[in-house]
Image: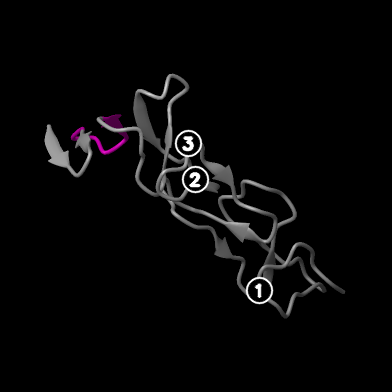
Amino acid sequence: ALLVGAASLRSSMASLRVVQSVCPAGFGQTSDAADCHKCPAGSWSTQGSAECGLCEPGTYSAWTGADACAACPVGTWTDEPGTRACKLCPAGKWTNTTRSTLEST
């Protein structure tokens, strides 16, 4: 195991053993608060957060371990929380802003 700050990092980088009660950004605590786990795609956390939060509609997180969600780019949208990818606007519809939660006609 490799010692990183206050946590012992397992080689898989999938979870961290908590030495102190603070998980790094992009990680949430397990239910027993003994370990930190990477936030799944579609969610995020800041350092010290106990839980991973879902990305809000209009935002996404394509990777695990995110410390923030990205805004859907122009021409894409999502109206659901916890999105891993934004949807392309269908033919005849469009968005001209980032972070869109619906397509327009």
Residue type, numbered disc 1 = Thr
Q: Which mark is residue 41?
A: 2
Distance CA(mark 1)–CA(mark 2): 20 Å
The foreground one among 4 and 90 is 4
Please say whether residue 34 is visible from this viewpoint: yes
Q: Secondary structure at mark 2?
A: loop
Q: Residues within 10 Å of mark 2 (few under 14, many from 20)?
A: many
Residue occupying image coordinates x 38% and y 34%: 37
Residue that sits furthest to the right in the current view: 105
- Queried whether the magenta region covers residue 20, the answer comes back as no
Side (left or right) of 41 relative to 72? left
Distance CA(mark 3)–CA(mark 1): 29 Å
Q: Which mark is residue 98?
A: 1
The foreground one among 44 and 79 is 44
Mark 3 or 1: the one toward you: 3
Q: Secondary structure at mark 1?
A: loop
Residue type, numbered disc 3 = Ala
Q: Which mark is residue 50?
A: 3
> Colour scheme in the image?
one colour
Residue stretch in magenta: 10-18
The C terminus lies in quadrant: bottom right
